[in-house]
Amino acid sequence: MTLGTVGTQVADALGIDPAARERIAEPIGSFPWGAHLPVGTLATDSVALASLAIALHGGRTGDVRVDRERVAASFGSERLLRIRGAAPSAWAPLSGFWRAADGWVRTHANYPHHERALRTLLGLPEDAGTDAAAAAISARSAAELEDVAAEKGAIVGRVRTPEEWLAHPQGHLVAHAPIIERRRWGHAAPRTEGFRVLDLTRVIAGPIATRDLALAGAEVLRVDSPALPETGWIHLDTGQGKRSTLLDLGRSTDRETFEDLLSRAHVVVTGYRPGALTRFGLDPEDLAERHPGLVTASVSAWGRDGPWAERRGFDSIVQAVSGIAMVESADGDTPGALPVQALDHATGHLLAAGIVWALTAQREEGGSTDLRMSLARTAHALLTSTDPATEPGRVVTAPPPLAFPGAPERYPVVGGEWGADEPAWLG
C-alpha cells in the first residue's frame, strides 16, 4: 500500500524507513460514507501506521492489512455503541451550527459546565430551548461570539473558509508547524522492560491513542480529577482495555500516590490545554528532568503556541474554524461536516504510532522523548492533501452470521442489479 499525503508526512516525521512501510499491504473493503476531502485515506493511513508501529515494536512478522469497514465502524463508534440496548445521546441540544448576524458559528455544549457557560454567554435561563438560543445567536456577530466565549469558558467557533483560517494568526502558525513534533533530549539509559502508561487525556483523540497502547499490551491507567466528571458513555466508547482512577493532585495524599505511579511509568499522555498541568510539574521538560527516559506525548486542539494555544476546542469546532465545514458544505452556504470525527480519531492513532516508535527508540538508544500533535494541524494536513476525495462503496451490507467451520467472513458476491443475469448456470 502506498501511504497517502498525511500518512507519508507522519512516517517521514517519525523516521519510518521505506522497507518498514512496505509491510503495509493494500487495504480491503470500502467506506460506507463519502466526503469532498480524502478523509478515508486519512483514516486508513492513521490506523495502518499505528498498527505498523505496534507490529515492529513487538517483533511481529507479516503484513499490516487494514480493513476499511472496521476503520469506518471505529471512527463512527458512537453510532454503534449500545448500553443496555440504548444508544447514547451524542450531541446536546445546544451543540451545533447556528446562524449569527454575519455568518455561522458552531457551538459545543455536551459537557454540563460548557452548557452553563454558553447559557451565561447568551443570557439564557436553564429552561430556555433551541429557539431561544437561535434568536440570541442571530443577534450577535460570529467573531464577537467566538472571542467572548473564549473569555467566559464557553466553546463557540466562527465558521471560516480555509483561506480565512490561513489568514488568521493561529491558522498561519499551525500551517507552518510539523504535523507531529518530536523532541529528544538527555542521556537516560535504555529501559528494557515494562509498558506502563499514565493516561491524562479526555475526549477523544487522547483516549483513542491510549486505547491503541492498551491493545498493544500496555498497562494503561487513566487518571482524572474527581472535580471534572467524564460522560459515562464516552469513557466506555474509548476506554476499552484501560483502568480508570480518580486523584485530586491538589491534595497531598493523592499527589504522593500519583508521584509513585509516575515513578514507575514508561509513558505519560496528556490531553489538556497547554499549560494546564504546569503547576503540577507535568510539563515534558519537568518530567524528563525528574524521570529520565520517560516518553511524553500530548494532544491539543490548536497547538502549544500562538494566541489560541490555551483556548478550548473539540473536533467539531476545529472543523468549523479551519474551513473543513465549508469545504463539506452541500450548497456552498450551509456548513457541513466530515462523516465522522476523523480529526480526533486519526490524530489519536497517529499519536499512538509516534509513542510506540519513540518507546522503541528509547529501548534501543536511551534518552527522553516528547511528542506533540494538534487537531488543527491534522485539519490543515487534510485540507491540503493531494489525495482524491473519499468515495463511498456502492453497497454496504451486514456480514454473514453463519459460523460453521470454515465459514467465510464475507459474502463472495454482494449482489448485482435485479434481473440482470442470464438464465444459465455458470459451470
Image (tube, rainbow, N blue to C red):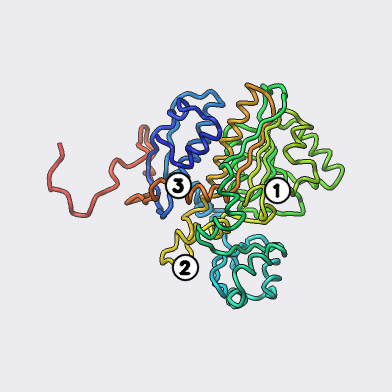
Asked whether 49 or 401 is in front, the reply is 49
Is there any visible trace of residue 54 in the rendered image?
A: no
What element does badge 3 sit on?
loop
Which quarter of the image is occupied by the N terminus? top left
Residue at which label 1 appears: 274
Query: Comparing marks 3 and 2, which lies closer to the viewer?
Result: 3
Asked whether 311 or 343 is in front, the reply is 311
The quarter holding residue 350 reads top right
| Residue at screen point 62% across, 75% down | 140
Q: Which label's residue is closer to the chain start, 1 or 2?
A: 1
Residue at which label 3 appears: 385
The answer to whether residue 99 is left or right of residue 146 is left
Please provide percent x and percent y for residue 159: 54, 64
Residue at which label 2 appears: 334
Please provide percent x and percent y for residue 180: 58, 40
| Residue at screen point 50% across, 40% down | 46
Q: Which label's residue is closer to the chain start, 1 or 3?
A: 1
Please provide percent x and percent y for residue 142: 59, 69
Q: Amino acid at mark 1?
A: Pro
* Residue 406 to residue 173: above or below: above
For the residues bearing labels 1 and 2, Cβ distance under 8 angstroms: no
| Residue at screen point 66% across, 36% down | 370
From mark 3 to mark 2, how far is it between C-alphas?
23 Å
From mark 1 to mark 3, how far is it between C-alphas?
27 Å
The answer to whether residue 305 is left or right of residue 16 is right
Query: Comparing marks 1 and 3, which lies closer to the viewer?
Result: 3
